[in-house]
Image: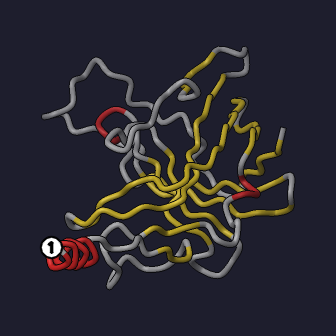
């Protein structure tokens, strides 16, 4: 009986691995599967909340939340990361909603219209680097950078990588406009 318990204990110890907790900006290279990149220094906290800016007559509202342990996969290896998720609404000068993701549920497999943080201070400059998944057919997919000004303001910089659709695989009846502000140093104010 002692031998059976010893064998079971050894099997449990060798098959159970503790999850490795690492600082948010650690590299995924050379880390174990299921590692957790945690916001240990609360670098994402200043961005959480509701924000507003006006650009070219359009009002842009951002609702930024923090998601703990969001899963992501790189080269068939699953990891977890604390991330900020940005939902947005863009209205024209008359108040008509042009685009809104405020009621969207961004599951890990759905990247359409998602704005998701990838890391912070990658250039040691008080920034959060994000990915915009793009709209229909990924039009507008690109990089967004938030740079903190103070506790009530940050700069928005958006660099779309794809601004046109593929006429072969994308149906012509969808909306391919990019409603997010394609600009640098747009100031958002906390609401």
Nearest the camera: 73 or 5? 5
Question: Would residue 28 be found to the left or right of residue 160 on screen?
Answer: left
Question: Would residue 73 be found to the left or right of residue 94 on screen?
Answer: left
Work out whether 6 lies above or below 46. below
Q: Position of residue 147 (x, y in %)?
A: 70, 64
Residue drawn 62% across the image and 57% down it: 157
Query: Colour mode?
Result: secondary structure
Nearest the camera: 90 or 9? 9
> Which residue is tagged 1?
4
Work out whether 63 lies above or below 132. above
Nearest the camera: 32 or 17? 17
Question: Would residue 38 be found to the left or right of residue 92 on screen?
Answer: left
Q: Quadrant of the N terminus?
A: bottom left
Q: Position of residue 185 (x, y in %)?
A: 71, 58
User: For residue 175, what is the image quadrant?
Assistant: top left
Residue drawn 55% across the image and 53% down it: 68
Work out whether 56 lies above or below 84. above
Residue drawn 86% across the image and 52% down it: 152
Q: Secondary structure at mark 1?
A: helix
Question: Would residue 189 be found to the left or right of residue 105 on screen?
Answer: right
Q: Position of residue 79 (x, y in %)?
A: 36, 64
Work out whether 113 lies above or below 19. above
Q: Residue furthest bottom?
A: 30
């Amino acid at each position: 009986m002692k031998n059976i318990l010893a064998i079971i204990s050894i099997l449990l110890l060798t098959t159970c691995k503790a999850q490795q907790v690492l600082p948010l900006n650690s590299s995924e290279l050379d880390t174990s599967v299921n590692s957790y990149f945690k916001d240990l220094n609360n670098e994402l906290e200043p961005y959480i909340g509701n924000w507003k800016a006006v650009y070219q007559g359009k009002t842009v509202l951002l609702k930024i939340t923090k998601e703990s342990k969001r899963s992501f996969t790189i080269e068939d290896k699953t990891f977890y990361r604390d991330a900020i998720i940005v939902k947005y609404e863009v209205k024209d000068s008359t108040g008509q909603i042009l685009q809104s993701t405020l009621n969207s549920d961004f599951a890990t497999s759905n990247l359409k219209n998602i704005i998701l943080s990838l890391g912070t201070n990658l250039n040691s400059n008080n920034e959060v680097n994000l990915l915009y998944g793009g709209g229909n057919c990924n039009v507008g997919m690109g990089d967004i950078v938030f740079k903190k000004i103070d506790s009530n303001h940050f700069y928005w910089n958006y660099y779309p990588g794809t601004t046109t659709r593929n006429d072969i695989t994308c149906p012509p009846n969808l909306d391919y406009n990019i409603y997010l502000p394609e600009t640098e140093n747009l100031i958002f104010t906390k609401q």
